[in-house]
Amino acid sequence: MDAVILGVTGLLASPSFQSPDHSSADSTATLRSALRDLAATTSLVLVDAGPADELESWARHTGVADLAAFRLWTGRLGRQAKAPSRLPFRFVARRLEIACDASLYVGCDDGLLEAARRCGCRTWDIRLQADESIPAEVVEAVEWLRESFEHHR
């Protein structure tokens, strides 16, 4: 696996991420810790279709901007990147110089999941149990994040 592409909304941040005040120090430390471990073994990419300025502010505030090899807020690519367009995933592949089928999109955005599949990326809809093809370190990180965030609520 050359890259793990993580959806932000619903996986790394709740829909209320727009204001940095919504993130506690504990939850941002948990997030950074989980992503640091993943980033040590693979290129970590953040992708989301939400509002670009708020997403970028969130990424910088939480410190995950420094852990990601690349961040792509699809709104900055224009209407042609709107899901289920394959453009965002092709863009990531070109930027990282990897094949789409060497990457894994992890998230719960239906449009981005479909776009990733259409582009040839492996996918894991986190609303479903991971199958055996999903690397254990990715499953462990996602499960740890879910448990930690539930604990901090």
Image (cartoon, grey):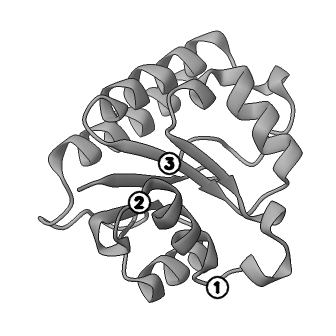
For the residues bearing labels 2 and 3, Cβ distance under 8 angstroms: no
Residue 53 in sight in this render: yes
Image vertical order of residue 37 relative to residue 133, above or below: above
The residue lying furthest to the top in this view is 25
Mark 1 burial class by Cα count in 10 Å: few <14, some 14-19, many 20+:
some
Query: At x 15% / y 66%, what residue is drawn?
Result: 133
Query: At x 30% / y 28%, what residue is drawn?
Result: 40
**Which residue matches tag 2?**
97
Residue 126 in sight in this render: no
Residue 82 appears at what percent x and percent y?
A: 75, 79
SS category of the residue bearing label 3: strand
How many numbered markers are drawn?
3
Q: Nearer the viewer, mark 2 or mark 1?
A: 2
Q: Earlier in the sequence, mark 2 or mark 3?
A: 3
Image vertical order of residue 113 relative to residue 132, above or below: below
Q: Earlier in the sequence, mark 1 or mark 3?
A: 3
**Which residue matches tag 3?**
45
Three-letter amino acid code at disc 3?
Answer: Val
